[in-house]
Amino acid sequence: MGEQTAPAKAAGPGADGRLTALLTSAMAFSMLQLFLLGALGPRLVRELGVSATVLGLTTTIGFGTAAALSPVGGRVVDRIGPRRSLVVLLLVSAAALALIGAAPGPGFLLAAVALGGLPQALANPATNKAILAAVPPGRRGPVTGMKQSGVQLGAFAAGLPLAALAGGIGWRGAVWTAAATAALAALWAHR
């Protein structure tokens, strides 16, 4: 069987804070692609020739894939463990974002968004299991609440810093920056 525990409990002050930051990041990256597509939608319509209908379908494809994979997501986390699940979640997020940034047209874009449904399906099982394994019972509520704020943090990142970055380096550059950041978070989760 795979790893059955979360990242090892690190001794000393700040261990809960580091884990909380990692889990919050995982939640943010699990949803970032859909938030970015919303924030950068007008650029995609203009530059990729994506119709408003296809742009709307990205949400359906992303959430539909996540819904279909969610029942399996919990079993995957049980099998490979929360740490490996977090690494997979972040690496697949990075890959989906990179593919969105490379999309030559609508079909490729929708396929990349579908790939991004996997991190959404893994996010809650992986982060919740990590909390159960590594956070003392008295701290689980606050850590869970904070990690859930990662969803809103992802929306904020797409709506301000990444949208502003797109104004300077283009929408593809902003999406690729997000992909690189997700890959760095995967390295952090691995360590």
Image (tube, grey):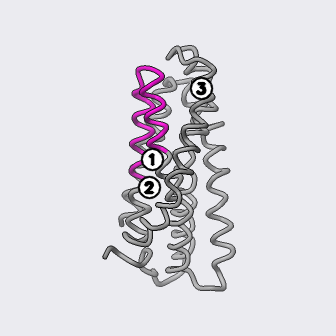
Name the residue carrying label 3. 55
Q: State whether residue 24 is above or below residue 2.
A: above
Residue at the image point whose x is 46% and y is 50% from the top: 118
Name the residue carrying label 1. 93
Q: Is residue 118 magenta?
A: no
Identify the image quadrant of the N terminus.
bottom left
Q: Amino acid at mark 1?
A: Ser
- Farthest residue to the left: give it: 1
- On the image, the x and y values in percent for residue 13 come to 54, 80
Residue at the image point whose x is 43% and y is 72% from the top: 78
Labels 1 and 3 touching (C-beta < 8 A): no
Instruction: Report the label total.
Output: 3
Mark before the other along the chain sequence, 3 or 2:
3
Q: Amino acid at mark 2?
A: Leu
Mark 1, secondary structure of its residue: helix
Q: Which mark is residue 165?
A: none
Mark before the other along the chain sequence, 1 or 3:
3
Q: Which residues are magenta?
A: 90-116
Q: CA distance from mark 3 to mark 2?
A: 24 Å
Q: Residues within 10 Å of mark 3 (few under 14, many from 20)?
A: some
Residue at the image point whose x is 61% and y is 47% from the top: 154
